[in-house]
Image (cartoon, rainbow, N blue to C red):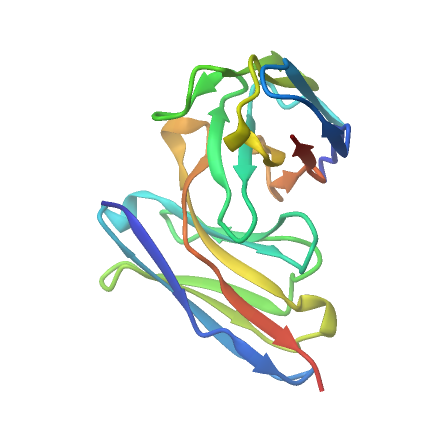
Amino acid sequence: DIQMTQSPSSLSASVGDRVTITCRASQSINIYLNWYQQKPGKAPELLIYGASSLQRGVPSRFSGSGSGADFTLTISSLQPEDFATYFCQQSYSTPRTFGQGTKVEI
Amino acid sequence: EVQLVESGGGLVQPGRSLRLSCSASGFTFRDNAIGWVRQAPGKGLEWVGFVDYGGTTEYAASVKGRFTISRDDSKSIAYLQMNRLKNEDTALYFCAREEAGLFEGIDYWGQGTLVTVSS
């Protein structure tokens, strides 16, 4: 199985900060890497698919990059509504696997 | 509007069975893989398994041999049959639609149904 390792597990940042979350796969997954945002009590929402493509309706302050085994999610200017937990997920093979999550506190 | 609605959760004793349902609407159900993702209280997301548009199923190692996913395209419903339940299966279970055009990303999720395994 492909292991996904996210870092950091949590972070504190201020409104307007640039925030970066990394995700590393235990083997190459090409660009089959997705990012999700989950707010308390809600289902996750897809932010980025294919490592760098912005899902429809997601603000442009979110961006993704990377290929192979190393990936990054960047929030260019953190907003109060971005308080949430972020998960990466590989969809290169089954079983699909998620990172452990990064909790972003404002 | 795409909607996924789970049902069937509840309190069940260890070793017993439970079947979850995922009713879909707003899209051509047979065109998409449908998966199940669970989240234990206060924990992260765990992929449980899926059934693809051809009926092929895949499972996480933690549930393989105990859980079975199926689909009824005529009713736009997917099922998660859970047998020999364990305490560690306690979680909120989400139904999820994979979209092949989005690198198999999950673009729609249900609201989740809670399964509690306890004696």
Q: Quadrant of residue A100?
A: top right
- Please state, as top left, top right, bottom left or bottom right, where the C terminus of chain B lies in the image: bottom right
Image position of A73 (left or right of B104) = right
Q: Residue at x 56, y 19 (%)?
A: A31
Q: Is residue A75 positioned above or below A12 on the image? A: above
Q: Write the residue at 69% across / 34% down.
A: A102
Rendered view: A9 above or below B110? above
Please provide percent x and percent y for residue A87.
62, 35
Residue B103 vertical position relative to residue B46 in the rendered view, above or below: above
Which picture quadrant has residue A36? top right
Residue B57 visible: no
Rendered location of residue B106, percent (x, y): 45, 39
A23 horizontally vs B39: left or right: right
Q: Residue at x 66, y 62 (%)?
A: B63
Residue in view at x 66 percent, y 85 percent? B13
Q: How many numbered marks, from 0 up?
A: 0
Q: Nearer the viewer, residue A61 or A32?
A: A61
Residue B33 picture location, percent across and down = 40, 46
Pick the quarter of the image with the N terminus of chain B: top left
| Foreground residue among A87 and B82 | A87
